[in-house]
Amino acid sequence: MMIADAAEQQNSVKALSTDEAYDILSDQRRRYAIHHLKQLDTAVSVQDLAEQVAAWENEKPIEQLNSQERKRVYISLYQSHLSTLDDEGIVEYDEENGMVSLTDAADELNIYFEVVAGDDIPWSIFYIGLTAAFSALVGLTYTGIGVLQRSQLIFVTIGMLVSYTAAGVIQTIQRKRMELGDSGPPPELQ
């Protein structure tokens, strides 16, 4: 019976529309709260959640927060943000016990959170450039124009495979560091 209930609950996860997801992620405190809850992967008290969010907002350790900084975030989470996240199915908020935990629906938000640093290019553009460069190199090698000859096509092909594999590994590592719930502060503070 418990297995059937768990399967039914998993199937009943509400799919978020793009507008709903962006609305949820539009608020920094909500992003920070989701980030911290993903890091812990367990229920946490509203007080502990508020302290961590306040620490990130004020860019200082929890121990250095004053009572006003803690209180401002706590009230905001308690009165607004946690009920919004609960209504959207992102968290389970037990007001009576003051505990919050993530639901499976929170995983749907990751797709909306690709962070591209100011001095980086999006991976999609990188792969288009890599494809164009290797297409030109293969064309030049195949036609024998320049220093490359047809016999060297295998080396160009191996270079292409190694480049795409390395790029994929680097992208995967970078993406893991830039999503909600990774270790450390939220991606926008890294």
Image (cartoon, rainbow, N blue to C red):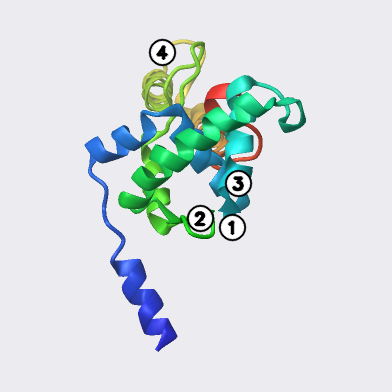
Residue type (three-letter) at the residue carrying disc 2 = Ser
Q: Could you say which is closer to the camera, residue 178 or residue 180?
A: 180
State which tag comes first along the sequence, 3 or 4.
3
**Badges 3 and 4: C-beta atoms under 8 Å apart?**
no
**Badges 1 and 2: C-beta atoms under 8 Å apart?**
yes
Q: Report which residue position mark 2 lands on.
A: 101
Instruction: Please report the residue visible at 51 percent of the width from the left and 28 percent of the height from the top.
Output: 156
Instruction: Please report the residue visible at 31 percent of the width from the left and 51 percent of the height from the top.
Output: 87
Q: Quadrant of the N terminus?
A: bottom left
Residue type (three-letter) at the residue carrying disc 1 = Thr
> Residue 141 in the image: x percent, y percent?
43, 22
Q: Could you say which is closer to the camera, residue 61 or residue 104?
A: 61
Q: Could you say which is closer to the camera, residue 26 or residue 84?
A: 84
The mark closer to the camera, 4 or 2, is 2
Label 1: which secondary element: loop
**Badges 3 and 1: C-beta atoms under 8 Å apart?**
no
Q: Report which residue position mark 4 lands on.
A: 145
CA distance for labels 3 and 4: 54 Å
Q: Report which residue position mark 1 lands on.
A: 42
Q: Which mark is residue 39?
A: 3
